[in-house]
Amino acid sequence: MNTLIDVQHACDTTQLGYTVPTDDKIQRWADTALSALKIQDKEVTIRFVDRDESQSLNHTYRGKDKPTNVLSFPFECPPDIPLNLLGDLVICVPVIHHEAVEQNKVVNNHFAHMIVHGLLHLLGYDHIDDEEAEAMERLETKILAQLGIDDPYQEL
């Protein structure tokens, strides 16, 4: 699988006392997700941000004035231009760490889940209604199981 991942670190995680996954792990997670859907040769930007940037983007694009774990920005290419860009994922490092602790999850497993979740959004999956949510959750759980990660929706 040849997913091209552009990783951007837009916050100083060490100063904040947080970690982010290695580029190798991010690559493996993205490749596994896209391979499960039989999708090849795509490009994705993954940007790790702080609470302020996440909140600003969430407010601007979703009308929600708070930081969030992951935002997905699909790229809509004109039909006559051949580009393999799926879009951008913006991941809020402090929110991921906070949620992992709150939900008693391994931090890297939660990062993996949010990357898989975000990639599915870039591919058009959604969870607006119950039926779509259940289908998306089943797919996420299946992909994460391939990575050796427990069902993120199970009650602990």
Image: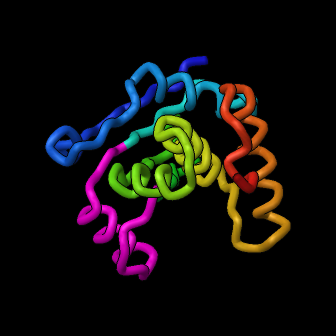
| Magenta-drawn stretch contains 49 | yes
| Numbered range of the magenta stretch | 47-70
- Figure check: 144 above or below 68: above
Residue appearing at x 67%, y 48% in the figure: 152
Tell me if I can see residue 132 in this picture: yes
* Residue 112: quadrant of the picture: top right
* Nearer to us in this view, 125 or 106: 106
- Figure check: 73 above or below 36: below
Residue 59 location (% of width, % of height): 36, 77
Left or right: 29 in relation to 132: left
Residue 28 location (% of width, % of height): 55, 22
Taking the view exactly as shown, the residue that stands out farthest to the right is 131
Residue 115 location (% of width, % of height): 53, 42
* Residue 55: quadrant of the picture: bottom left
- Figure check: 112 above or below 134: above
Q: Quadrant of the N terminus?
A: top right
Taking the view exactly as shown, the residue that stands out farthest to the left is 15
Residue appearing at x 34%, y 76% in the figure: 60
Q: How is the image coloured?
A: rainbow
Residue appearing at x 47%, y 47% in the figure: 87
| Magenta-drawn stretch contains 91 | no
Left or right: 120 in relation to 3: right
Left or right: 14 in relation to 4: left
Residue appearing at x 66%, y 26% in the figure: 147
* Nearer to us in this view, 79 or 51: 51
Number of callouts in the render?
Answer: 0
